[in-house]
Amino acid sequence: MSVLACAMSQTLLAEQQPDLVMTEVAPASVAADELTFNVFEFQVDGNTVLNSAAIEQTVYPFMGEHKTIKEVEQARAALEKAYQEAGYLTVSVSIPQQDVDQGIVRLLVTEGKVDRLQVVDAQYHTLSEIKSRTPEFAEGSVPHFPTAQKELGTLNRNQNRQVTPVLRPGKSPGTVEIDLQVKDKLPLHANLELNDRYSPNTTELRLNAGVKYENLFQKDHSLGLNLQVSPEDTNEVKVLSGTYVIPRLNGDYFAAYAVVSDSNIAAVGDINVIGKGYILGARYIHPLPLSDGFYHSLTFGMDYKEFKETLFLPSTDPTSTGPLTSKTPISYWATSVGYDTNIQSYLGQTQTSMVLNMAPRLMGNSNAEFDLKRDKAKANFFYLRADAKHLYTFASGWAMQAKVAAQLASDPLISTEQFSIGGVESVRGYLESSRLGDSGIAGSVELRTPPLAKAFKQYAFADYIKDMYAYTFVDAGRVQVRNAAGLEPFYELYSAGLGFKLKTTTGWFSYLDYAQAMNDAPQVEHGDYRLHFRVGYEW
């Protein structure tokens, strides 16, 4: 936008610049360029946007005795440049015809105001809403382009809409007309996915379905719903979640979400676990000041979690009419503070996240419930979670990605707060959340081929390939269990394998990972091979 605006402002300035005439009492034989006169004051007319101190600082070096027309022109150019550097690209400065026998030189500022603002080609977003989100381009205003650029950046955060300003001279001299050209699409999205991200002692398949609308009330509010079930046994896993996101004009976000789960899982042997629970949470995301290639933000969160679990154990009493039951309900509040970064440079792209999770005493959590759930677990827990990922693409097209996730806790945690390893997003070749610990670390190194679509460019279907590459990887993870109470204090998982990713321009996608496990875990033995898959469609 800034390049377009600069080019447009230069056109405006050229059109608005009047003929420069300087009248001064001098011998007729003296050339105009050699005329000298005293300049004790610059009188600047027409200014409403630049403060007086900035103007005085700009023109002061050109004041004094025995000045020439050339030096006055330099003062004019310097003042005009000051407006440009301050972000007022539609402002021009001229030297009107005048006499300077009193030592006063008048400079005329022409502020290029917006004569007309119109929104064109918008289909799913109202014209009035787009105009209201760009007040710097309001009719009658002198646009400050750095502010306008931020407004457009906020407006273009919505993936369903792209707004580009086009400037041209207005019908009245010294004015501009602005068209906000809109490319938008229906802000409704949905997805359907089948995968095998299952945990120990459950059936293998998971079916996910989601729908999201991203322009409620014409305010870019987003409402999303997602359902996950185990299609082979729908009583085993059912999770319904919803999110509501409100973007603020200053760039901040407020998000609220809810998760409701219902499960009936065979745990170990004849032990069954029936669990129902829900989570209510809120997040406030505040982007911090940007610099070139560096984006970062703070996140403040609060959650309420409630889980009701009942364990059914086989009875050893022959007179018993049913299994023994053990109930471990728990409900608690938790807060979090996070810091996220996204760095783009010639060294690649780096993303980091650090979150402090805690439950202060004042939140009223029950120590008895925590102790019943996990021996010596504390209601006023806290732990630090960190994630980092770096992607570097070589000139040849090959790419390498490294990522690491870690958690540090000083006390035993209940299972819902523990660090897990195993699964597609952790250590491939193992079931999801194969091992849990209070503290832990997991890492992965992945080498990717160049985009494979080029190899099929001679075929018609190549036009439908959005992203396709193969990769090889090595994964590892380790967790520590505090107060192990008969369990192993440490668990480690290692694996290596190959993968393939395909995304099409029509919305179909497929991810495949084939990994070999390097040590034992629940339902996995050293040397076992496992294929992880995700297939689905999104629009």
Image (cartoon, rainbow, N blue to C red):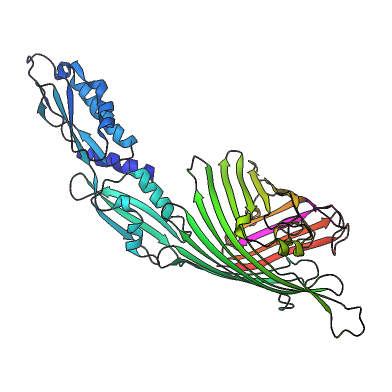
Task: Specify the quadrant of the image occupied by residue 28.
Answer: top left
Closer to the camera, 423 or 321? 321
Task: Specify the quadrant of the image occupied by residue 62.
Answer: top left
Closer to the camera, 359 or 141? 359
Q: Number of marks in the image?
A: 0
Q: Is residue 181 visible?
A: yes
Q: Is residue 6 above or below residue 457?
A: above
State whether the magenta stretch is mostly helix, strand or loop: strand
Residue 41, horizontal then vertical, whole percent:
17, 24
Q: Horizontally, is 517 left or right of 31 in the view?
A: right
Q: Horizontally, is 205 left or right of 146 in the view?
A: right
Position of the C terminus, as image quadrant, is bottom right
Magenta residues span 476-504
Q: Is residue 432 visible?
A: no
Q: Is residue 13 above or below residue 487?
A: above
Residue at image coords 34%, 55%? 180
Asked if the magenta segment contains residue 500, the reply would be yes
Residue 181, horizontal then vertical, whole percent:
36, 57
Residue 168, horizontal then vertical, whole percent:
27, 49
Residue at image coords 88%, 78%? 315
Q: Is residue 8 above or below residue 60?
A: below
Residue 378, horizontal then vertical, whole percent:
72, 56
